[in-house]
Amino acid sequence: MTASPRILRLDSSASGASSVTSNLNALLVETLLASNPGATVVHRDLTELPVLNADRFAANSTPTGERSVEQRELAKLSDALIDELVAADIVVIAAPIYNFGIPGAVKAWADLVARASVTFTYTETGPQGLLTGKKAYVVSSSGGVELGSEMDFATPHLTLFLNFLGIADISLVDAGGLIANPNKVAEAENQIRSLASQ
């Protein structure tokens, strides 16, 4: 990791400022900044992203030099998201559990940054991620689903996706099962302080 790491903060909650995950994500970034003087932050609200459609998929899949004028315009967003991810040393993702899975906003981001020969490649032994050497934090919360339980299809999905891109160093901030354990937010805050100081 560089002496002045670049942090990419990604928020995805539909609840906005009242979101548990967004607030925990903010605390995590603040704590990381305190532990890494000189670090810089790029912040992206994933709820503003479009869903991948046929035209955007074709534009993103076409080599840069072969894109039409329309495709170049459509591919700008994907290119920008990939540039943010490639430049980051630390990726901090707020991903609440919605209906047992990741939010649609996170899936939209994943669909826009997963690009063959750019963020991953195919080899004789299978796909290989190209974004190695990065640290990722996944901040997740839910009302009724405990993280790691058989009902949690969100954190395994996101972990698998990050691994697919080559990001293997992942720490999970656990604020799951808030209904059963109202102290979970405070526990997650303590976890953040411990993780960010390591």
Image (cartoon, rainbow, N blue to C red):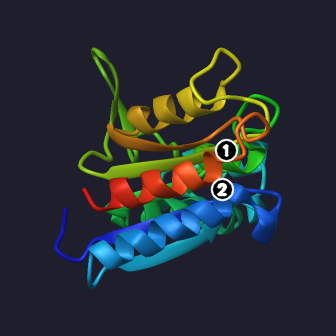
Check contact, mark 2 vs mark 1: CB within 8 A. Answer: yes
Q: Amino acid at mark 1?
A: Ser
What's under tag 2, amino acid-wise? Answer: Thr
User: Looking at the image, which residue is at 54% across and 27% down?
Assistant: 156
Disc 2 element: helix
Q: Residue at x 67, y 44 (%)?
A: 141
Whether residue 171 appears in this view of the structure is yes
Quarter of the image for the N terminus: give it. Answer: bottom left
Give the residue pinned by disc 2.
21
Measured from the top left, where is residue 139 in percent x and y?
A: 55, 49
For mark 1, give the secondary structure: strand
Q: Is residue 108 above or below residue 143?
A: below
Q: Which residue is mark 1?
A: 141
In the image, residue 50 lies at what x, y percent? 77, 56
Residue visible at 69% across and 62% down in the picture = 74
Q: Is residue 183 above or below residue 152?
A: below
- Circle 2: is it few (<14), some (14-19), or many (20+) Cα within 10 Å? many
Residues 131 and 34: in front is 34
In the rendered image, which quarter contains the C terminus?
bottom left
Q: Residue at x 27, y 16 (%)?
A: 124
Rendering coords of residue 101 (x, y %): 72, 31
Q: Is residue 147 above or below residue 120?
A: above
Nearer to the camera, 84 or 153: 153
